[in-house]
Image (cartoon, rainbow, N blue to C red):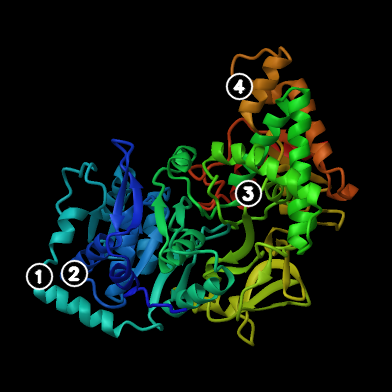
Amino acid sequence: MVTYHFAELIHIQANKYGTRTALKHRNEETGKWQKISWRDFSESIMLTAKAMAEFGIVEHDNFGIYSQNMPQCLITDFAGYANRAVPVPMYATSSPAQVEYIINDANINTLFVGEQLQYNNAFIVQKGSEILKRIIVFDPKVKLNPEDKTSIYFDDFQRLGDNAHAETTVKVRMKEASPDDLATIIYTSGTTGNSKGVMLRHSSFIEVMRIHQIRLPVITDKETSMCFLPLTHIFEKAWTYLCLTCGSKVAINRDPKKIQETLVEVHPTMMCNVPRFWEKVYVGVQDKINGFPGFLRTLALDAVETGHAYNLDYKNKGLKPPFALKIKFKFYNKTIFALLKKVLGIEKGKIFPVAGAPLSDEVNIFLQSVNIPIVYGYGLSETTATVSFCPMEGFVIGSIGTIMPDVHVKIEPSNNEILVKGKTVTCGYYNKPEEDEKAFTDDGYFRTGDAGRLEGNVLYFTERIKDLYKTSNGKYIAPQAIEMLMSNDKFISQIAVIGDKRKFVGALIVPDFDALLDYAKRKNILYSAPEELTDNPDIIRLIESHVEENQKNLASYEKIKKFILLKEPFTMEGRELTDTLKLRRSVILEKYAHEIDMMYKE
């Protein structure tokens, strides 16, 4: 097994694979998928790298990429690596204020942008900035502001470096590229305060590629991975780099809203994703099963039960299943399970890593039972993604997997914090030495901020330490654990558990309005607008019953006693959610302070 510095990786793969497809992307006008060969990928990277050198980007310069997923994001990444420069990704949904903060913090002179929204926001920032000097636009359909005299389209930018001097400069830099060079700065999504720039060296990525190939020999150059999560997210970035390292094809999903369409068009064998995607799959399938007539419903439930027995009671434990169970499972696998996966577009699925937030055991067990090969894991930007993940067989339900090779984990005795050490761990936060002091122990372990426990080499997640609440009665509450219990309910879209210094646990709930509308129709509940349903006594009683059912196994002091139904969802635009869809609790508490106070009023 060989791992390469990213300055040379794609070019080595191009020599090996030539005209084979490296990337696929959907033409938004025709709807057809276009292919980019390894050779063309390599040549485009070199053109871009030479243009960067000609444009004045030098070794160790930071430059920004503010775009949704596009082939140009990867081309620009690897062109930066060839110049020993440092790409700093920004979420496509970032506001001008968020972009401006990163521009200033990372001293970014050059910014690559994706579509019209990103360009418009970037130009607003540039007009008031003494740091941002130039914008390069990926999408040729973007209309430049009439006042804009400095921006350039990506295709025109690439032509700037087509000369011998720029080529020589890039080749010298590639030869001097070092594992100790800074590879990227990933800005945390910032659930509290300003986001911090996580510095990751090339040595960390090289180590990630090495240890994942040890743990995942299933990834070969025959696979196709759907690139769905933002490439700004360390999970997708590291996963996509791993796919390219293994010679796998990467299909780039540009619009997150179109993922259901693109899945059935591409039929990927792999895709990394967050739990929310699979929670929606689970709720949708459960809803379908419950709507089946008697015989079909019995058959579907028996299929799930059979899959549970075969995959979890026998296969996962390394046991040989009884002959009758094996035959029964094969039948369901070729009929009901095959149909389900075909509808989702994942019938060729080989491995679907899931991380980024807690995944409920209920959803995990269901997906394993219907033979969807998800692999649940845990990691952070600061650990270059994976700390642990479940093996494809021999995993423990309820855990976040076994520790990666040569990654060292221990538990802080005082508060059960998960501590991590190894080559994959960040070298620190950009321009924030005071944060580095707080982030590392005296013996060099990184403080994850997550509580957990370790049993042998198997890691368990308990709660985000900073999210723990203490009620006025002195009881500790883990809001994420309670919220996760509600995450699989068809009537509950989002929930934020409240309780810090309060006398009981409360919640703000965003109902699933589609499910409510269907329920209202069946129960002849009248309304003039969907939002009115949140005030309807019948709907409130419905949600009460579901909340109570979901928390039946909690201790009395942990249970939600009161809740408020919100008329609008938590969104990134409203700042209640981070770009990785985590709750910004401080924003929610401030925005809904009046409603929360009324909930606790006698």
- Say whether marks 3 and 2 touch (CB < 8 Å): no
| Percent coordinates x, y for residue 597 in the rendering | 72, 40
* Earlier residue among tags 3 and 2: 2
Q: Nearer the viewer, residue 139 or 500?
A: 139
Task: Reply above or below: 458 against 305.
Answer: below
Q: Nearer the viewer, residue 237 or 365?
A: 365
- The three-letter code of the residue at mark 1 reads Asn
| Percent coordinates x, y for residue 552 in the rendering | 86, 43
Question: Which residue is identified by label 3?
Answer: 372
For this orientation, the residue located farthest to the right is 556
- Say whether marks 2 and 1 touch (CB < 8 Å): yes
Q: Quadrant of residue 287?
A: top right
Q: Residues within 10 Å of mark 4 (few under 14, many from 20)?
A: some
Question: Which residue is identified by label 2?
Answer: 50
Q: Secondary structure at mark 2?
A: helix
Task: Reply above or below: 487 against 222.
Answer: above
CA–CA distance in space, label 4 to label 1:
61 Å
CA–CA distance in space, label 2 to label 4:
55 Å
- The three-letter code of the residue at mark 3 reads Ile
* Earlier residue among tags 3 and 1: 1
- The three-letter code of the residue at mark 2 reads Lys
Which residue corresponds to the image point at 73% horizontal and 50% vertical from the top-left?
Answer: 365
- Say whether marks 4 and 1 touch (CB < 8 Å): no
Question: Which residue is identified by label 1?
Answer: 163
Which residue corresponds to the image point at 61% horizontal and 26% vertical from the top-left?
Answer: 514
* Earlier residue among tags 2 and 1: 2
Q: Is residue 365 left or right of residue 388?
A: right
Q: Secondary structure at mark 4?
A: helix
Q: Residues within 10 Å of mark 3 (few under 14, many from 20)?
A: many
CA–CA distance in space, label 3 to label 2:
44 Å
- The three-letter code of the residue at mark 4 reads Pro
* Earlier residue among tags 4 and 1: 1
